[in-house]
């Protein structure tokens, strides 16, 4: 029965291909940045509504978040396919979120059409603003994931990987306040806020040698004065601090703040530290779930690429989801290894033939993995046990 159902799911995704291409092209040609993804939400939810999903827009107080629910007769778990659809500023869909959204709705609709009698609850959660807005973090805080057992999504990449770890990241702003004075006539009466910023960079650069390999600290100067003959009264910098392991990450954040405090003491400036409320957590992999996904990929003749799960690590708000419920965030290759995300080449790949194939592959593997879990309750138990560390 399982194999017959699986074959039907694969065929159904193939049948939906034209619709999925339309959706992916529409989102790609209308790039909308964080929290402004109105057209994307429209096109995704119209498709889901047409296929009998009950859509609620504006969940969690976010205008461009949504969920779409189909409840089957079974008592099985609630499985969520997560749809991202935000673009980057200026560069458009260079992270390929048009593919993420299309694959997730494709998986949900194919599964519902073929296996409506065998499934528990399928939910598509539309999660806006992955790029810098932490949409998923806000949705977690608003309880949107409380009645969901598993979260699944694919992300386009230059490699096919079941697990890629991600770094925790915090954004920290430093504002130094000094005293303006004529830089030539009265330098002794001024307090140089820009020196506070420059020393912060220098202190952090000295700190780097004492940090673990996976730490990333990168910053820019956001204000640095108005003219060379005015001692800057105010200057500011913005940093991202990242690390793989959460406890260590918190220590590094503290050390970075100490660098700025030291700079303030040395320069006699006043320092304000602004830490972003939304902190992206590291990714917690679920290898049981990854294994099921990998098996389903090989069923459709896609092999995982070799490579370390710690290779090319970034950060994403899916990290927070993965710390809340068992999650898979599988990378599906849509381009050659030398094309990297957040570049124009990747943006073009996101609507290329390989990009379209990525949607179909992703939708199939997502739907087949969910089907496995619905049909075999022991798989859900294993996934849950791993998540709980039992
Ligand atoms: Zn991105
Ligand atoms: Zn992305």
Image: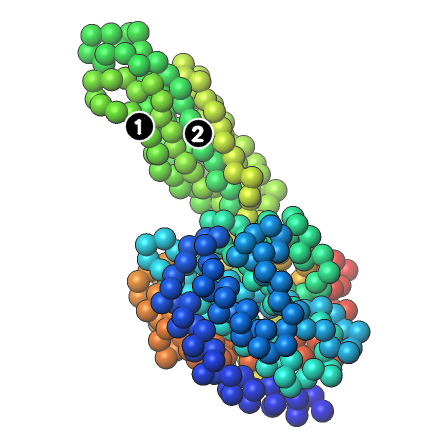
In the image, residue 268 lies at what x, y percent? 40, 14
Q: How is the image coloured?
A: rainbow
- The residue sitting at the right extreme is 75
- Of the 4 image quadrants, the one containing the C terminus is bottom right
**Residue, x 51% and y 42% (percent of image)?**
170
Q: Is residue 256 left or right of residue 223?
A: right
| Few, some or many residues within 10 Å of mark 2 (<14, 14–19, 20+) | many
Query: Who's the residue at 43% across and 78% down the image?
Result: 21
Name the residue: 24% across, 17% down: 230
Q: Secondary structure at mark 2?
A: strand
Instruction: Name which residue lies at 36% across and 67% down.
Output: 29
**Is 33 in front, or is 375?**
33
Q: Residue 136 sits in which quadrant? A: bottom right
Residue 181 lies, with reference to residue 221, above or below; the image says above
Q: Is residue 152 visible?
A: no
Question: Element type at marker 1?
Answer: loop
Q: Which residue is mark 1?
A: 224
Residue 174 is labelled as 2
Picture quarter with the N terminus = bottom right
Q: In the rendered view, would you say 320 is above or below 220?
A: below
């Amino acid at each position: 029965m399982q194999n017959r159902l699986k074959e039907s799911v694969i065929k159904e995704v193939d049948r939906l291909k034209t619709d999925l291409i339309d959706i992916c092209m529409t989102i790609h040609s209308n790039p909308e940045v964080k929290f402004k993804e109105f057209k994307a939400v429209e096109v995704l939810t119209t498709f889901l509504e047409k296929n009998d999903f009950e859509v609620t827009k504006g969940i969690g107080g976010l205008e461009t978040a949504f969920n779409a629910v189909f409840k089957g007769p079974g008592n099985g778990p609630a499985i969520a396919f997560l749809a991202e659809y935000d673009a980057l500023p200026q560069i458009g869909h260079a992270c390929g979120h048009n593919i993420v959204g299309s694959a997730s709705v494709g998986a949900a609709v194919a599964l519902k059409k073929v296996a409506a009698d065998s499934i528990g609850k399928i939910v598509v959660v539309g999660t806006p603003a992955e790029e810098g807005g932490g949409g998923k973090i806000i949705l977690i805080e608003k309880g949107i994931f409380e009645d969901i057992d598993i979260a699944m999504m694919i992300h386009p990449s230059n490699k096919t990987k079941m697990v890629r770890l991600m770094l925790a990241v915090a954004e920290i702003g430093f504002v130094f306040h000094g005293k303006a004075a004529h830089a030539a006539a009265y330098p002794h009466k001024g307090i140089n806020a820009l020196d506070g910023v420059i020393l912060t960079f220098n202190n952090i650069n000295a700190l780097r040698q004492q940090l673990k390999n996976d730490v990333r600290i990168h910053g820019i100067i956001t204000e640095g004065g108005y003219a060379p003959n005015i001692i800057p009264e105010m200057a500011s910098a913005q940093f991202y601090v990242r690390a793989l392991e959460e406890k260590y990450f918190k220590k590094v954040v503290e050390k970075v703040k100490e660098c700025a405090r030291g700079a303030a003491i040395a320069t006699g400036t006043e320092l304000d530290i602004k830490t972003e409320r939304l902190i992206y957590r590291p990714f917690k992999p679920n290898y049981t779930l990854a294994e099921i996904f990998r098996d389903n990929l090989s069923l459709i003749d896609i092999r995982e690429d070799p490579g370390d799960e710690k290779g090319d690590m970034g950060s994403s708000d899916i990290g927070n989801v993965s710390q809340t419920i068992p999650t898979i965030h599988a990378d599906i290759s849509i381009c050659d290894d030398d094309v990297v995300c957040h570049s124009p080449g990747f943006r073009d790949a996101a609507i290329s033939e390989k990009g379209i194939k990525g949607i179909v592959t992703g939708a199939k593997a997502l739907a087949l993995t969910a089907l496995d879990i619905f049909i075999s309750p022991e798989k859900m138990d294993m996934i849950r046990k791993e998540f709980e560390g039992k």
